């Protein structure tokens, strides 16, 4: 057996032993993230200053009425953003819970030992948010049977996840098909997220769930679960324009539903400057050039 194979065997054995991974993470790893996990060094460095700013902001930044909000995050960059967003919403006077999952990659399995280390790493990193923000690690959730309508919706999401990951619509989902194992992985992950969100929403009167993207992966599972229960879902994303974000209420923001804009403005003729701006934009896209505050070359 190779050294790598031996290490994998040892990790598999230790992954089922209580508290071994957590003790290893705290003592042997000295709190550093596992190699199979992700490091949130930027978040760790920024949190103390963020929290001081929130505390010093006081009541003059608070809004009325106060709402109870559930913020969701997954993957390193979205957990960073979700933590920051949770603090901002808390500073505005809202009661905020932050739910997250501890997997590093959406398309690869995580062995139990590394997952438990990753959970311990995230719990230690995020614990300074308490008591202002309540934390929920959804990767710890026990998955029971989900309501049939939600289960059917998640089955559609599982397939979308595989199409998104493979970047093609046609999938090989036979018994030994090349896409079958990924479909099974996405099915497990999505149901963990959905079960966790379902438990939280049934256990508390949340006014809204705030979710990145809302169309794929655990983000889609969280959004579909919120809408299944009739809880408002606010989805957001970032596009090709710097210092801009997309927002949607009770809709998947990535679908870019502009029907309301067209209803309000569709019959209004463009001004000369607006027409010129659109012409310049498309000229830049055809030439692969940057334009205005756009950060992507087409």
Image (tube, rainbow, N blue to C red):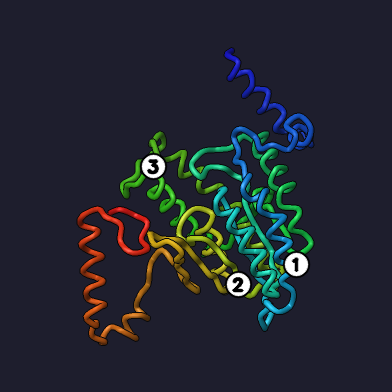
Secondary element under disc 2, as helix, strand or loop, is strand
Residue at screen point 59% across, 68% down: 209
Residue nearest the observer in this picture, 145 or 140: 140
Mark 3–mark 2 Cα distance, whole angstroms, equals: 36 Å
Residue at screen point 41% across, 63% down: 254
Q: Earlier in the sequence, mark 3 or mark 2?
A: 3
- Near mark 3 (Cα within 10 A), the count class, few <14, some 14-19 or many ≥20, is some
Residue 162: x and y in percent read 41, 47
Where 102 falls versus 51 (above or below)? above
Where 152 falls versus 140 (above or below)? below
Mark 1–mark 3 Cα distance, whole angstroms, equals: 52 Å
- Near mark 2 (Cα within 10 A), the count class, few <14, some 14-19 or many ≥20, is many
Q: Find residue 72 and report its image quarter.
A: bottom right
Secondary element under disc 1, as helix, strand or loop, is helix
Q: Residue 208 carries which label?
A: 2
Q: Earlier in the sequence, mark 2 or mark 1?
A: 1
Closest to the camera, between mark 2 and mark 1, is 1
For label 3, the residue is: 173
Residue nearest the observer in this picture, 67 or 6: 67
Left or right side of 48 for 9: left
Q: Which mark is residue 55?
A: 1
Residue at screen point 75% across, 53% down: 127
């Amino acid at each position: 057996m190779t050294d790598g194979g031996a290490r994998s065997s040892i990790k598999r054995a230790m992954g089922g032993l209580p508290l071994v991974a957590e003790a290893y993470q705290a003592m042997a790893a000295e709190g550093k993230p596992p190699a199979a996990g992700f490091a949130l060094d930027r978040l760790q460095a920024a949190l103390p200053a963020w929290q001081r700013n929130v505390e010093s902001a006081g009541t003059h930044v608070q809004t009325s009425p106060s709402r109870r909000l559930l913020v969701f995050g997954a993957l390193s960059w979205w957990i960073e953003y979700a933590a920051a967003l949770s603090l901002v919403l808390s500073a505005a006077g809202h009661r905020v819970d932050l739910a997250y999952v501890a997997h590093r990659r959406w398309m690869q399995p995580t062995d139990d030992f590394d997952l438990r280390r990753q959970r311990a790493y995230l719990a230690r990193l995020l614990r300074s948010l308490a008591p202002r923000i309540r934390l929920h690690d959804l990767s710890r959730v026990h998955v029971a049977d989900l309501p049939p309508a939600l289960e059917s919706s998640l089955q559609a999401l599982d397939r979308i996840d595989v199409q998104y990951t493979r970047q093609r619509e046609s999938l090989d989902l036979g018994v030994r098909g090349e896409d079958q194992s990924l479909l099974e992985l996405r099915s497990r992950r999505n149901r963990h997220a959905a079960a966790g969100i379902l438990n939280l929403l049934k256990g508390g009167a949340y006014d809204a769930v705030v979710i990145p993207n809302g169309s794929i992966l655990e983000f889609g599972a969280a959004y579909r679960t919120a809408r299944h229960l009739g809880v408002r879902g606010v989805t957001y994303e970032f596009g090709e324009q710097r210092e801009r974000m997309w927002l949607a209420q009770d809709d998947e923001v990535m679908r870019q539903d502009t029907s309301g804009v067209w209803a309000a403005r569709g019959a209004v003729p463009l001004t000369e400057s607006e027409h010129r701006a659109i012409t310049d934009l498309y000229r830049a896209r055809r030439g692969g050039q940057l334009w205005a505050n756009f950060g992507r070359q087409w």
